[in-house]
Amino acid sequence: MRVAMLHNRYRSGQPSGENTVVDQTTDFLRRSGHDVDVYAQHSDTIAQMPGKDRALLPLRSVWSFSSARDLTFRLRESRPDIVHVHNTFPLWSPSVLRAAHQLGLPVVATLHNFRLMCANGVLQRDGRPCESCVGKIPWRGAVHGCYRESTVQSLPLVAGITVHQKLHTWQKYVTTLIAPSEFLKTRYVAAGFAAEQIVVKPHAVPFSGQVREGAGEAVVFLGRLTEEKGFADLLEAWDASLGQLVVVGDGPLRAAAEARAAADPSVRVLGELPWAESMEIVRTARAVVVPARSYETFGLVVVEAFAHGVPVVASRSGALAELVEDGETGALADPGSPDALRKALRLVTDPHTSITCGERARRVYVERFSPERDLAATERIYADAIARHAAGR
């Protein structure tokens, strides 16, 4: 099968689970013998744009005629069997969906976030989940300056969401929408999308080949050091009696983390590390902690921990509550509650509990999140979308 994989890559200085998923999906498909053409725009190029082009970028993000022309030309040359769209913001725009459709090509699109209903794409305001715009015209996103805390910068996004809601762009030109979690699907159905258009396919992660032995050592936080990721809650919840906390990542709260580490020998801050090195730290962990305050649409770090036989302490919110089975593969805690988080950490850092939950987590990974299962599911979705498109549905 020949696949056109389309994605607007996020800035290289901004860690992106979406970039990772696109790279891994492409790799899984190519390794199985499929031909994959990657059509990528790079947000890194925005800084080098002439001032006029940057000024017009908000309009281009709503509908880019140049992107549609470019993609049409390239698809006519390659003639793929299917087009798989990931992120279109801000350089591709939804115009590429119609371009592929007009060439008679089936289109599938992975929903990585809430950008089709929310100006900031994460259903969050003031560090808390917010659903004010779900199923509605998202004017509140402009009033509250939800994108980059700016009304001016939020307006084009609100306008784009409204335009494509009215035109039903994603419903008309996309055969199948892929959601990585049931939670994400429910939000899109609540926003007015048809449930039958959306298929749930969890993301997968590759496995390094080594499973944790014994109960592991430190509790590991791997991610952005921000309020919405619950990192401040983790610092408040942490107690030296829980063992060692290893922090891998960077973000606005790094200074607070380093100040805590200077005063508390049980906390170590390593900053950002290469993926392979991060996975080695995960493999030796007593538990991985994901205390997010905001909704997570999936949780790659959860599956990475499971792959290595490591349990996870996570927030009872969004897709995290779907991934982690409380008391079986880890523990859940109410988001924004340091006391509840401390209690959950104390449970899972017990050596016997960590071993038992880690063994279950490893079985869940093999059964649900391995590359082999991901590839088979992707191939089924492609085949079904091609058949439905041919039948005119």
Image: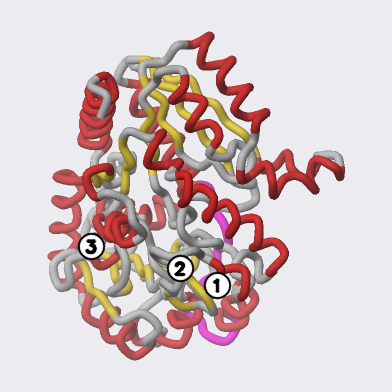
Quarter where residue 146 is shown: bottom right
Residue 32 lies left or right of residue 237; in this view the side is left
Q: Nearer the viewer, mark 2 or mark 3?
A: 2
**Place of residue 205 in the rendered image (x, y in percent of width and height, measured from the top left):** 33, 43
Residue placed most toward the observer, 191 or 227: 191
Location of mark 2 (residue) = 133
Question: Would you call the spot at circle 1 few (<14 residues within 10 Å), some (14-19), or many (20 or more)?
Answer: some
Location of mark 3 (residue) = 322
* Picture residue at 30% right of the left edge, 81% below the top: 334
Location of mark 1 (residue) = 140
Residue placed most toward the observer, 312 or 114: 114
Residue lying furthest right: 51
Specify which label sits upstream in the sequence, 2 or 3. 2
Q: Which region shows up in magenta? A: 262-274
Above-or-below relation of 140 to 180: below
Above-or-below relation of 113 to 100: below
Image quarter in which the N terminus is found: top left
